[in-house]
Image (spheres, coloured by chain):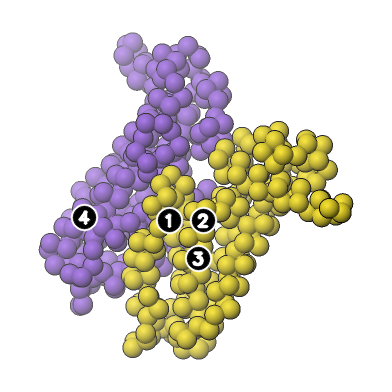
Chain colours: A purple, B yellow
Amino acid sequence: MVKQERAVRTRKALIAAAAEVFSREGYRTSSLTVISRLAGVSSGALHFHFPTKSALALAVEEAAADRLRAIIERCEMFEQPQGPIQLVVDASYRVVEQLEGDSVLRAGFELGGHTEGLSSTGRVCDLWQGWVASALEQAHGDGRLRSEIAPGHVAAVVVAVTAGLEELGRRDSRWLSHPTLTSFWRLVLPQVAPAGAHLPL
Amino acid sequence: MVKQERAVRTRKALIAAAAEVFSREGYRTSSLTVISRLAGVSSGALHFHFPTKSALALAVEEAAADRLRAIIERCEMFEQPQGPIQLVVDASYRVVEQLEGDSVLRAGFELGGHTEGLSSTGRVCDLWQGWVASALEQAHGDGRLRSEIAPGHVAAVVVAVTAGLEELGRRDSRWLSHPTLTSFWRLVLPQVAPAGAHLPL
């Protein structure tokens, strides 16, 4: 393995271990020693890649944002006959599903604002909110969202539900199975879609 | 001050301090020394009232459940011409408002499941979900909730939104101001109320 590849692997292992430990112990209480041990990496190597715990947390947030972008891109690859609202619904299911097994994505939702130098809500939540809002704005422009509905307001509600399922799911993973998200969309979709629209559920 | 009164005060001060520290530092990382110092109480007095950190966390959860019950009771005291749906809407506003300044209530939402010996979702969330479900069941029985709507499903969605606003609000208190909750109810109410019902917003 060439040197650069090894560095990339070490970095990845550290980010995965940090996400795991942050998610289990909380950011403040997490120890860098525990993280480097879990990653199978020396303390010196950790400090070489991440001089501070907050640098490591930022890297976890970036990795979580990448996971979210990947989910969104996978959803966007498929033809969406129902347009952008369908896309938002699909992506919300993929996000909530992935929260169960993916400690990096989970840590991304949890870390926001707990680390220094971050925007107040955190990268992942901001990215999620921004993407949902812009998809719904597109639906609005296409006449697929009722004209009196504000895309940004719906996006905030979607982010609140996702964050709530993430928080509740940490304690009881049943919250991350589909029923509550389906109940949510069943209540919300008829309200946002123009009369006569086929609802993507 | 008689001895018993002093004991009640000490207990209260310890619960308030614990909620504050749990909420700021996280349950696992919180130190009993920091809590007793913040409460202005000796370490011995803390251990006299709460032999373990988990006993203290249980007391915080009970206190948070009492705060939630008080919010609900205050809402129930007023005549609700719109019936139980109005009651749920009003209580949701009071809960989200109180989350901003009340670290005991906030700690109750956060602690669930992080401490041992608790139901998986935690007392406050369970209590909130149970009460919302039973109010909506009553609305269902009175014909004030559309017959095809399952009260338990709506209750789970309300709990997810509340938990999400609590989590997001920890980082950015703007989430605890009204707009997102109002957007949520504006989307959900027309869907749950029978045609022609006056919506309590």
- Which of the two marks, 4 or 3, is nearer to us in this view? 3
The amino acid beneath tag 1 is Leu
- Which of the two marks, 4 or 2, is nearer to us in this view? 2
Residue B83: horizontal and vertical position, in percent?
Answer: 49, 84
Q: Which one is nearer the viewer's eye here, B100 or A155?
A: B100
User: Which residue, as the protein is rendered here, is positioned at the far front?
Assistant: B1
- Is there a contact, CB below 8 Å, between mark 4 and mark 2? no
Question: For the residues marked 4 and 2, what is the alpha-carbon distance in whole angstroms?
Answer: 31 Å
Helix, strand or loop at mark 1: helix
How many neighbours does mark 4 have within 10 angstroms: few (below 14), some (14-19), or many (20 or more)? some
- Which of the two marks, 1 or 4, is nearer to us in this view? 1
Question: In the image, is residue A11 above or below residue B26?
Answer: above
**Residue at x 45% of width, y 17% of height:** A46
Task: Name the chain letter of the residue that bears numbered label 1.
Answer: B
Helix, strand or loop at mark 4: helix
Q: Are marks 4 and 3 on the same chain?
A: no
Q: Which mark is residue B176?
A: 1
Q: Which mark is residue B94?
A: 3
How many neighbours does mark 1 have within 10 angstroms: few (below 14), some (14-19), or many (20 or more)? many
Helix, strand or loop at mark 3: helix
Q: Are marks 4 and 2 on the same chain?
A: no
Task: Name the chain letter of the residue that bears numbered label 4.
Answer: A
Q: Where does label 4 land, which residue? A: A135
- Is there a contact, CB below 8 Å, between mark 3 and mark 1? no
- Is there a contact, CB below 8 Å, between mark 2 and mark 1? yes
Q: Where does label 2 land, which residue? A: B99
- Is there a contact, CB below 8 Å, between mark 3 and mark 2? no
